[in-house]
Amino acid sequence: MRTEHTLVYDAPAADWLEALPLGNGRLGAMVFGGRALPGSPAREHRFQLNDGSAWSGSPRSQDLEPHFSRERADGILAESRRLIRDGDYAAAHEALKELQHRHSQSYLPFADLFLTIAPSGSAAAARPATNGDPAYSRSLDFARAVNSTRYEVDGHPVSVHAFASHEPSVLVISVETDAPQGLDLAVRLDSQLRILRRTGAPASGPSSAVLELKLPSDVPPSHDGGAVEYSDDDSLSLQGAVAAAWEHNGTEAEADDAGLAATGVRRAVVYVTTETTFRGPGRQPGGTVATAANSARGTLAAARAAGQEALLARHEHSHAELYDSCSITVDTPAWLGANTARRLEAANTHPDGPLAADPGLAALLFNYGRYLLISSSRTGAPGSREGSAWLGTPANLQGIWNDQLQAPWSSNFTTNINLQMNYWGAEPTGLAACAGPLFALIGALQETGAATAREYYGARGWAVHHNSDIWGYSKPVGHGAHSPEWSYWPVAGLWLVRHLWEHLQFGAHGTESARGFARDTAWPAIRGAAEFALDLLVEFPDGTLGTSPSTSPENSFTAPLPGGGTSRAAAAESSTMDLTLIRDVFLMLGSLAGELGLETDPVVAEAQAALPRIPEPTPGRNGRLREWLADPEEWEPTHRHVSHLYLAYPGDAPLTPELEAAVSASLDGRGDESTGWSLTWKILLRARLRQPGKVSDLLRLYFRDMATDRGGQSGGLYPNLFGAHPPFQIDSNLGFVAGLAECLLQSHRTSGGVPEIELLPALPRELPDGAAHRLRARPGVEVDLEWKDGQLAGATLTSATARNVRIRYGGAVQDLHLEPLRATVLNLALFSPAGASA
């Protein structure tokens, strides 16, 4: 067995999609690795910096016009329902545009640190640096969360290492050489944001530099063509600072542009941190740019007092607590190359697909995905933000990394699949702690979403639409000009609360802290989601309950026009997605009420009364699952969204053979080719259907290299293995973690009320030999697996509490009693035909 925990390259990054990511959940950096400056012996190291809280706008962004009176919103909804009832879907589609507000705010690039390294004195005899230097290497070690770059300057080795310390929140960059004359070093800070003040070493203290920044008050999506806006009103946006300090054994020199400079350096450590006036999801910013700068200086002082070695030891321990909580290895010959991008390209030349050539890529992407979630979604320790703990911000469309002021889709929280997919792998692979920032955002959305539910629907509870941001934006976006197929979708909150439910299902039951989470966090969120769902439901003439208008993200159908012909439309009655989410939330509510002794709650009674009146999903045309109750003809049969298949994944409702066949037929109809995140969702759905052959077909597409442009609907992997929508979206990377885990272990079914854990339900043929350590199964069981020649070779199960479980492998089952914290080794002989039970 060998492990896959490192990306390696033999040249500096030529662009952002070749750079390598570091992050601590708050501070992110893309590391380019020291490009050669033309005609010079110097190399310039770019560290493109992000701060997880660096978003445009403020909570007041949601209060900008247009405002909707109850009468106006009621009128729009009533008119769209009437038009739908009369069969004028195209007119209903247009009517819903009147309900649109503006846009969520945007995640922003924060700053850049440029570190220039040259022979001391830049001696004329020193040969120019080249990007093709045979001594050059750069790497990212997932297990240590350390980036390393090595090369030679004037014939002497230079090493540059970097890591993002979690507490204190600081990027640490070390430079070492054995060159007798040492090196000339220069540090320069810059930003795309508005720079209010540059402060260099003379004014801010010895060996430090600070940029004070103002963030925009409004950044519209790039596809809308609007401009980035700043406001003189500080309450409408954040302010912030980036600060750098260093220590070295050389001589300080005069620096340009309020930076840092030194000569004759053989060892240096640079500390970099960021700070903003963000005070928590949905909360009004607090403080000033001066307080942000002072806080940044305080963080640097703490980092320098601790020192690089102590910070590295602390960092490695903190990271390992999460990263080592789960692992997958694949038995395959060692890859000995020096460039991961070329490794991917070479694997893609194999006639049977990339993983047939190089199975280790699957383990590499699994480990990378877990690394990326740890790096982009963590809470902080008390004191990491002035006056409060850093609750964290969830991983957005690009995790925590972005270099564009107007990023694709604002790099926001897209809540009709992408935000949720970011966290699908957290619970099954030991990263439940990384979901804390998501839970904090859900808490903020309950407040803003309650206002949206009242304003737009006259409803109780809370509502969230298609896009959100750190301010808890919850209104329908679109500026009155965009298609309701994505802008009108008020049930995102019903999907988001599933993550609270999964947290409980994967083992957060039984302890006092778990009961507190169920009572204080999960219950109010799920209850409020159920309240909104109850008020959203309408009664149809046959006595059933459903939704109208109803969309299925982000799909549309062929609608007849009253005068003849057809058009594209997106709003009808009762999408399967709506009904499945509503049923799901009602069932969660009832189950949680039973646990907490709240069965008499009036919302529980309302939900239980409504459940039998909500139509069940059924097959429709061509044997496929209906996407809307009326089963209209698809406008785009191969659309990337498969929202109507939620019931199969991430839902966990028991599927009859008829429904399983309908889900499979729907996937067949959609086809395999799609964007990165869609490929990942299809992998998970095929795994749930126990179809390893189809999983293999999808993996072949997922592992394509993006060196070849195949068009906007074809996913793959960029040189740094970031997932392509295209463009880059991190959901496919993070979703792949869940996808591979689901192929190896499933635990969403029960058998006679006993939890069922299924081993290797959809093992891809390209991974015949391997092992998994500490995968998580519901309801709180750790599972170690080993397989050989595509067959189970060993399994060990451990539970924190005593419980009975049923183990399924192939067509056989085995009942086990697990004692608390005692590893139970599975008896494989009982899975032989003779030992199989019914």
Image (cartoon, helix red, strand yellow):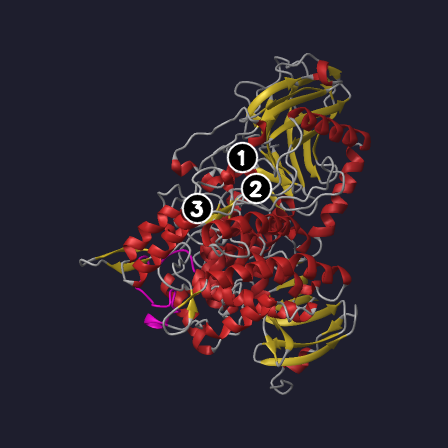
Q: Quadrant of residue 642?
A: bottom left
Closer-to-camera residue (422/133): 422
Q: Which mark is residue 57?
A: 1
> Three-letter amino acid code at disc 1?
Gly
x then y, percent, for residue 208 = 71, 21
Residue beneath disc 3:
69
Q: Nearer the viewer, mark 3 or mark 1?
A: 3
x then y, percent, for residue 458 = 48, 54
Quarter of the image with the N terminus in it:
bottom right
Q: Quadrant of residue 637?
A: bottom left
x then y, percent, for residue 626 = 38, 68
Residue beneath the point at 39% across and 50% down: 713
Labelled pair 2, 1 in contact (Cβ < 8 Å)? yes
Magenta stretch in the rendered image: 620-642
- The secondary structure type at the circle numbered 2 is loop
Question: Which one is earlier in the sequence, the residue at label 2 or at label 1?
Answer: 1
Residue beneath disc 2:
471
Q: Nearer the viewer, mark 2 or mark 3?
A: 3
Q: Is residue 763 visible?
A: no
Of all residues shown, which one is farthest toward the left? Answer: 563
Q: CA distance from mark 3 to mark 1?
A: 24 Å
Q: Is residue 207 above or below residue 744?
A: above
Labelled pair 2, 3 in contact (Cβ < 8 Å)? no
Question: Which one is earlier in the sequence, the residue at label 3 or at label 1?
Answer: 1
Q: Is residue 673 above or below residue 765?
A: above
